[in-house]
Amino acid sequence: MNSIKKNIENLRNELHLHNYYYYVLDKPKISDYDFDMKLNDLIDLEKQYPEFNDVNSPTSRVGGAIIKNFNSVKHEFPMYSLDNSYSKDDLEDWDNRLYKNLQDNDLQYLCELKFDGVSINLTYENGKLIKAVTRGDGIQGDDVTENIKTIKTIPLKLKGNYPSKFQIRGEIIIEKGDFIKMNEKRLSEGLDPYMNPRNTASGSLKLQDSKEVAKRPLKCFLYQIVTSKQIFKTQNECLLNALDWGFNISNTYKLCSSLKDITEYITYWDANRENLNYEIDGIVIKVNKIDYQDELGFTSKYPRWSIAYKFKTEQISTKLLSVSYQVGRTGAITPVANLEPVLLGGTYVKRASLHNQDQINKFDLCINDIVIVEKGGEIIPKIVGVEIEKRDIKYEKIKFIENCPSCYKLLSKKESEAHHYCLNYNDCPPQITGRIQHFISRKAMDINGLGNETIDLLYSNGLILNYADLYDLKKENLILLERMAEKSVENIFIGLEDSKKIGFERVLFALGIRYVGQTVAKKIANKFKSIDNLMSSSLDELLLVDEIGDRISESIVDFFSIKENVDIIYRLKKIGLQFEMDKSNEKISDVLSGYIFVISGVFNNYSRDELKRLIELNGGKWSSSISSKTNYLLGGSNIGPSKLLKIKKLEIPIISENDLIEMINLKP
Ligand code: AMP
Ligand code: ZN
């Protein structure tokens, strides 16, 4: 029996360590496959021997606990907010106050990034995470321990020489890239996108099903050790030690010895924050020496030994001229504010998205209102307020439209959905062109030579009504169109011909079935292998597929129950599109397993897509952005300068297409 216990404990320790290598250090030592196998072994053992249960086992990362109510917990040490500063003068004032109190001319400061996320207080005892509480009102917060355990950058078990009891604070964030991916997935499923990473992170912590939280790409940066008795001399030392115990500490902090150093740090990060993969809203400056921190203490609201410097988010007022409404390919209606153009952050802003009716109601918007527009991390500016006092006496409230702006059919709005929808699937022009535009888009059929405007042009000239019609286009019709040169026409036909090679999973995605985004399409294609199998499967059979729920299954069944859709598929099949999984797509080797490539530049022998396929067929992965996880940059000529800079910084080697082929040919 004892040997089983030992076995379980060894497995747990091993998995804790590999989790750390992977998520905190970004340097995995075993393959994902081996990790999963070990985890499965542990899951089995824990099931078999519940007497050796450990609430901090690596198996708790996958979630499972359902939390009905989050208990309110009083903080042992209050979670203060930070005093804010917005200028060099503010900082100088703060520095003068410090000098008055401490009389030290050689003060040292630790500057850190101010991560824009949700703060969390973690309690560790004997190296184990025992409690995680949100900030709440600073005096008491919510116990979200079960949800926090699913965040892989937070250690469940510490390593090294840690104190027997302490608390540590940090910020939970969602990286920009992950956030964009989350929203792309939501959009492809016909759901409303999330507003920003911070709110999404905050909402995630309050989900009742920790399995759902485990699926969210949450990460955590730690920045403050809190104890009743001081254990280190400086903040710098605290961070270095926390790093040793296995915490994720950002390496962006800097020790500064003058206001000039601090200003330099601020200027650097203000200019470079765009390049970070997460959002920051300022800089936090801390007195480095803990003795001094204790001496300075706290006001009723914030520590005297720390101050935040807030970056400016640019805001400007302008007039709301009108609201127009866009119809998406799924029939969803999006209101868009048309603004009197104003210069903001170097570009003229003329429009801002209003998302849906709730947004309009929130500000109770009226035509001619003076609205405040802000450009945050997002590309599309948003309306963040209204200057009510400037409202006309004769105001005109914005009334959400009742009919489709394009086909005039009555709109439908379900209680459970945020959007209004036009249900005129077959005859609403923007839905028709939207579906065809989705079909030709880069991630779907990637038809070179065709763009959104050409689709509009072809549709308005009566040449296409659905995506199958694209393949029946005639050269003599196209050439008559405005702006269509012989060369462009040729390109369209080449592009269409090439698209016949696109694999089944992408064809399936291209069909534009509601809720069937790229990931779902891939899953279904792998499961059913051909469109015939898929079309003939029942709702129950679809529901059996992992992660395919009611909504997706019903939408698929609905799609194939429409005769027009089935006819179009038969036409596409005859034309020669791939409606079966390609057997030649099956893996050739595993030589590249564990390697992640980023592809950049122009190549002589292969197209980028061919290179991606070669990597995948040999067990490797590719990614579109460089991170510390990237193993190689596969570069051609003309690699982008920002990419070059980044790989230099991360010391990532560049290889050529020939090098890649050589790597593949080395297979045993
Ligand atoms: P505020 O909410 O604007 O008063 O700012 C205080 C908050 O900044 C804290 O509650 C933390 O959640 C957050 N914060 C982000 N990064 C840091 C950091 N490096 N050090 C301290 N607090 C930080
Ligand atoms: Zn319509």
Image (cartoon, rainbow, N blue to C red):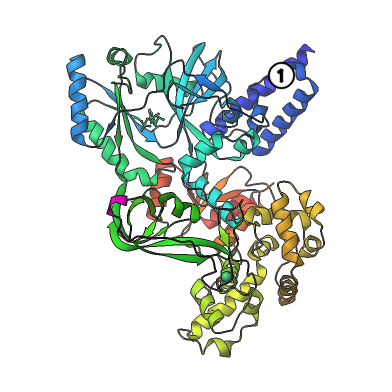
Q: Which residues are magenta?
A: 388-412
Q: Position of residue 15 (x, y in %)?
A: 64, 27
Say above or below: 161 vs 397: above
Q: Is residue 570 above or below residue 592?
A: below
Is residue 574 left or right of 190 when viewed as pictured? right
- Count how many numbered circles sit on residues in the image: 1
User: Pointer 1: what residue?
Assistant: 53
Looking at the rendered structure, the kind of residue marked 1 is Asn
**Residue occupying image coordinates x 49% and y 52%:** 358
Report whether the residue tagged 1 is closer than 8 Å to ligand 1: no
Q: Main secondary structure of the magenta part?
A: loop
Is residue 577 placed above or below 651 in the rendered structure?
Answer: below
Q: Is residue 587 visible?
A: no
Q: Where's ligand 2: which quadrant? A: bottom right
Determine whether the residue tagged by mark 1 lies in a helix, strand or loop. loop
Residue furthest front in the image: 393
Residue 316 visible:
yes
Q: Is residue 377 magenta?
A: no
Count residues near mark 1 (Cα–Cα under 10 Å), then give few for <14, some for 14-19, many for 20+: few
Q: Is residue 407 magenta?
A: yes
